[in-house]
Image: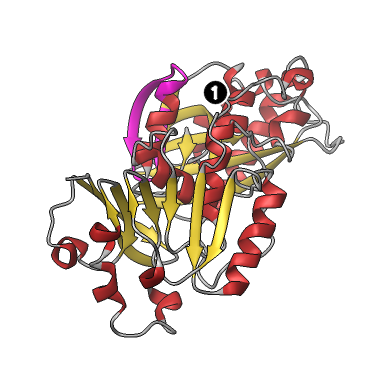
Amino acid sequence: MALCTSGLEGAVCKELKRMGLKILKVTAGHVNFLGQMSDVPRLNLTLRSAERVLIEMAEFEAKTFDDLFDGTFSANWQDFLHSRATLVIEKVKVRNSKLSATGAVASVVKKAIYEKIGSKNDPDGTIYPLYVYLKNDRVSLLLDTTGQSALSKRGYRLKASAAPLRETIAAGLIIVSDWDEQKLLVDPFCGSGTICIEAARMALGILNDKRTFAFQSWPIFADVKMTIHSFDGVKSKMNKIAIGFDRDPSMIRIARENAVRAGVAGSVEFVCKRFEELEDFKNVHVVTNPPYGVRLKDIDRNFLAKLAKLLDKFAGSKICVLSPADLERILKIKASKKLRFQNSGIWTWYYIFEPS
């Protein structure tokens, strides 16, 4: 199972299909797919729009704690965990089920697993994070291969704007927009540069390899640890992959610093310029997250009227905009696609306008 921002499951599905993996089920924020154990390193290294990669260990019905214990015990935990393992219940989510006490659920699950693996109560420090989902009396138990930090924690963004776009969301927006990597990507409201940087990372094939994952310490993956950095991405031949603009010089400085840490400084450009001062671009690909919510406090009331000029400034371009506003009314054009999801606690739309 891949976890992602609810509403951007389509981006994860696109990535998984490109890897040749079969999608089994898609629900809000969850994408279940069929894979092999050997896929785990590749998934963690290369997925851009997912937050975590989990292995489903068991699924069963449980209306009593005895059912929960027996169902948990029946899974093949000994094939994954050794007797000195430390099991950490990272999350218990219960919905519409007879068993509702999350603490008790976690306790029973841990007890069953430790009994199954014959725990010696002598842990060696190897951590196995576990997610427990209980919905309509159906239990799903999943090992988290990603670990303490989600895949959105790329490591390059030490500073950000007032309401930064999470890295995985930025990548997801680019993926569902079907960006042709041979076209310049433009973000006219770039803030700390996340969209442009994620586009460059994608085009250059930069992996999530500046970090460690939970699975790397598991004995079952001992044979693959030495080859974890062997996946090669497709390298873009474009000198300039993306360009971002922002009216705030401090944001431009932060964006440039982030680009250096991300290893894409030579492929992206950040320019301090107001939207209304931009020169006209033709036949480019626009992905942007204009100010709204917290970021809108310092924006004048005519801002949305300025957005209406997007079509004029980017003639012949695909324009993809994240906004809670009714952009179809403002731009007086029907979006070819729009997705709804929460960003920083605000319900928003992602509009994709095809070039006319």
For the point 44% across and 77% down, the residue is 294
Identify residue type, mark 1: Ser
Residue 61 seen in this snapshot: no
Quarter holding the C terminus is top left
Where disc 1 sits, the SS reads: loop
| Of residues 162 and 330, the one drawn nearer to the viewer in this rendering | 330
Q: Percent position (x, y) of residue 14? A: 38, 30
| Of residues 180 and 220, the one drawn nearer to the viewer in this rendering | 180
**Magenta residues?**
17-32
Q: Residues within 10 Å of mark 1 (few under 14, many from 20)?
A: some
Q: Quadrant of residue 138?
A: top left
Q: Percent position (x, y) of residue 24? A: 35, 24
Q: How is the image coloured?
A: secondary structure
Query: Is residue 9 a member of the stretch shown in magenta?
Result: no
For the point 44% across and 26% down, the residue is 16
Residue 45 seen in this snapshot: yes
| Residue of label 1 | 74
Q: Percent position (x, y) of residue 140? A: 46, 35
Locate residue 262 relative to residue 193 in the image: left or right. right
Q: Percent position (x, y) of residue 337? A: 21, 45
Compared with residue 205, is residue 160 higher up or lower down, i.e. above or below? below
